[in-house]
Image (tube, coloured by chain):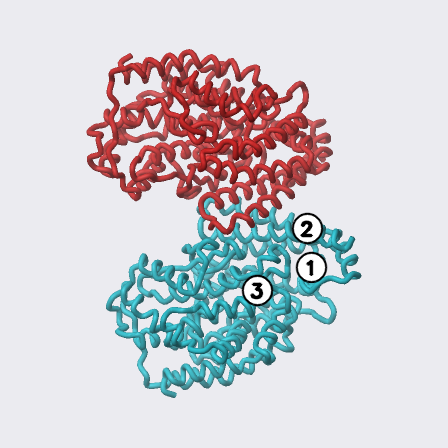
Chain colours: A cyan, B red
Amino acid sequence: MATKIYAELMDHVKQTQALSQIAGLLEWDQEVMMPADGAPARAEQAAALEAVSHERRTDPRIGDWLSALEQVELNAAQSANIKLIRRTYERSSRIPGKLAEELARVTARAQGIWAKARAANRFEDFAPELTRIIELKREEATCLAHDGVSGYDALLEGFEPGMTVAVLQPLLEDMRPRLSALREKIAVSKVTQPHLQGPFDTGNQMELARKLADVVGYNWQAGRLDLSVHPFSSGTAGDSRITTRVDDTEPLGCLYSTIHELGHALYEQGMPSAHAFTPVGQHVSMGVHESQSRLWENQIARSRPFCAWFFPHFKAAFGDCGVDNADDLYRAVNRVETGFIRTESDEVHYNLHVLLRFELERELIVGDLDVVDLESEWNRRFGRDFGVAVPDAASGVLQDVHWSVGLFGYFPTYSLGNIYAGQLHALLRANQADLDGKLEQGKTGDILNWLRDGIHQQGSLYGPQQLIEKVVGEPVSSEPLLDYLEAKYGELFEL
Amino acid sequence: MATKIYAELMDHVKQTQALSQIAGLLEWDQEVMMPADGAPARAEQAAALEAVSHERRTDPRIGDWLSALEQVELNAAQSANIKLIRRTYERSSRIPGKLAEELARVTARAQGIWAKARAANRFEDFAPELTRIIELKREEATCLAHDGVSGYDALLEGFEPGMTVAVLQPLLEDMRPRLSALREKIAVSKVTQPHLQGPFDTGNQMELARKLADVVGYNWQAGRLDLSVHPFSSGTAGDSRITTRVDDTEPLGCLYSTIHELGHALYEQGMPSAHAFTPVGQHVSMGVHESQSRLWENQIARSRPFCAWFFPHFKAAFGDCGVDNADDLYRAVNRVETGFIRTESDEVHYNLHVLLRFELERELIVGDLDVVDLESEWNRRFGRDFGVAVPDAASGVLQDVHWSVGLFGYFPTYSLGNIYAGQLHALLRANQADLDGKLEQGKTGDILNWLRDGIHQQGSLYGPQQLIEKVVGEPVSSEPLLDYLEAKYGELFEL
């Protein structure tokens, strides 16, 4: 009987999961393939799909099935599925259909208004939209509150299950002193940094991007690489697509965006196929997802031995361009500069950008900060953290798309991903003999296998923090990341 | 009150239409973009989408809304919408969910088995699947029977509303004597036909294909051109995509497939935007759709004046390749040969291919022909119609994908489209001053405007036959098509 109920529930969940995959494809197509005039119909398609999906996610039969199954003994994967379905079901059911619809409508419109405001450099054009979005997100947080979880925490757990501000804030804030000290020391270092000199053929950039995909073990039978304005990854195990961008004045944006997205895609390609379409077979959190992209992008592809492998390919693609040997390339891909844009920032500055957003968005959601004061507060705190004045809204408060699409609680998972990556990397170095020798030859198979076993194949069998702690054998901590950054950049800048 | 009910019904229908557009995008992506390993998940996605769509199409509230609205006075477009929604609702409701699911499952599987059987040239590998499909289609026809419409007619009206075998069979069969006589005369003509000599750069083929899209007025803001194994068109007004194929030994396949698909896409791009997402705003039938693709492909792009415009572009793309002037090109694009493959056949032979399928599939559905005898019957009748022996199953009974995906009743709409195109072309020639002079300059705007007004902008306000009769002022007839073919090929082959 339990078997039959479990099968019925899984049939339902499988279909819902399939619909959610379709939603992902609609977005991919919109960013990569759709002609301009397709936008109005695409909005209707996305809304219609969300309407039927919401109906399915909140189908009261799910509650009945769960109640029955919570009384019986199940294996580990089944139990995990039941818990995960319960969580999604309750979370979905807490949000009234009208609120979900209104959020979808407002954020669909706001995204375009944000893009125009950014182009015009006028925060005031976007402020009314953001005010409305924050009202709705506060309402959503109120609806989502449960078991002592409320406010910002209720939004956060949608991206990083089990994480709370009480744990996350000290974890992230404790990084600030060492990161600030490091950036200040680098700023006065006498070491000169190489400059790349273009132009850089865009066809060769894409060819090199494909070579990077080959070298990290990306399965082309289960993915593809295309161009989009902002690089992203999309899809699931059998169809895990990535995008990149090309700029003929600067090749590293294309190449390292590609590796970053490859890290995400390798995670999806490694999901346990036995649990496809069930919650256990999905990625466990945005933080763990980001740990995979950042590990490949930074600890691996920005390492000295990887640059030794990469240099001849880079040289073959671009000829004389200001880097004459592997060490030059290593220094070029690890330039450190105080910049305004998070997505373009180096490993040293990146988490300070995230801390700023984390702090501001928490205050916006709990009501300690009003949108009318947001731009001046952004600029004031940016000066505090980075020692430079923000020149305009596009380089400041308007730079990220996240808030315009209603993503509150998402930013801190970027830093959490870096922290997880730091821990995984430390263990990888401890466990893998001759890692550098293999990287110098472009051999990354052992790294991928290790991530497959420890992280990818686990799907959502454990919670995100539990998974990391299980793999590294220690509590979540930023120490390994900070140790790595200080050692690497200390050596690079002769500190 | 009626206004409110009408709005509710339209909201529902709009969402259903949006879901159906998504289904189209899934297919486009599968043929054009999807990596190989994405296939299993894509099948689940398509099935899940079909399940929720079927639920929506058969929602009993539709019946209530319709009953209320059928009692009140509505404008012409609203009345047409009500009639069309009633038809779709009843048609969908007549098919049990289980049968729809089983058909989806069996045909999804059969498509792959057909492809393998065709590659292996073994009809017997596909025969069991086809047998099962025909059983299910017979069952479907039985379920769909209503108001004296039954059997094959019930399947046919899914593609060509209002059409019946009683009307269609004589209409198509009456073409046979004149078509056969024409092909026999051409076969013994002493006129030599030019041969194109390659290779033909595939990049230049695609560039020329884009030029063709420009010249017919395709809106690139609302479409795109990609490659696929079999060319097709897909999408709706704001996002109407086409595909083509390239072969460096032969450029006309690419170029004329492109024009064919452009004809379909122009029809979709011309749909009345005021009625987007409602039945009145959709194409009226597969026959009318095909009339648009065939008119552009044949009567326009295979005409002498169009070839006069086309020749310098063709020459610039491919250099010396066996056509030295516009007349050579005109003869090259109008070669007539007895071949085995419908999709590659010329204007003279094309409808004879369709007649063969129409005759066989009618007999299969009504039970006059069994699958076990199908291959031998195909070969026997092909010899009867074309005077040559079919060499193998891939060139015969296995050549078309249609039956493997359950398309019975679809084939005759190809010939109906040719007949409609013949009538539209005759009127176009009568109405448009200096049509040839404009075509020689690549000016097709007047043709497109005329089709926009008469056909595209009408959407589904009238039934397909009514629409054609309204535009041409005469009953549906194959006379104009046959007159055109005899005149054109009589002159070409000095008959």
> Which of marks 3 and 1 precedes in the sequence?
1
The image shows residue A234 at horizontal and vertical percentages of 51, 57
**SS of the residue at dot 3?**
helix
A439 and B63: which is toward the camera:
A439
Q: Are marks 1 and 2 on the same chain?
A: yes
Disc 2 target residue: A12
Q: Is residue B371 left or right of residue B294?
A: right
Q: Are marks 1 and 3 on the same chain?
A: yes
Toward which corner of the image does residue B266 lie, by quadrant?
A: top left
Quadrant for the C terminus of chain A, please: bottom left
**SS of the residue at dot 2?**
helix
Residue B349 in sight from this viewpoint: yes
The mark lying in front, picked from 2 and 3, is: 3
Q: Is residue A307 left or right of residue B275?
A: left
Mark pair 1, 3: CA separation = 19 Å
Q: Are marks 1 and 2 in contact (CB under 8 Å)?
A: no
Q: Residues within 10 Å of mark 3 (few under 14, many from 20)?
A: many
The image shows residue A262 at horizontal and vertical percentages of 45, 63
Q: Amino acid at mark 3?
A: Gln
Q: Amino acid at mark 1?
A: Ile
Q: Amino acid at mark 2?
A: His
Q: Residue at x 42, y 55 (%)?
A: A226
Chain ID of residue with mark 1: A
Residue A373 in sight from this viewpoint: no
Disc 1 target residue: A85
Q: Which mark is residue B361?
A: none
Q: Is residue B197 left or right of residue A19?
A: left
Disc 3 target residue: A457
The image shows residue B177 at horizontal and vertical percentages of 42, 11
Q: Residue at x 49, y 61 (%)?
A: A265
Mark pair 2, 3: CA separation = 23 Å
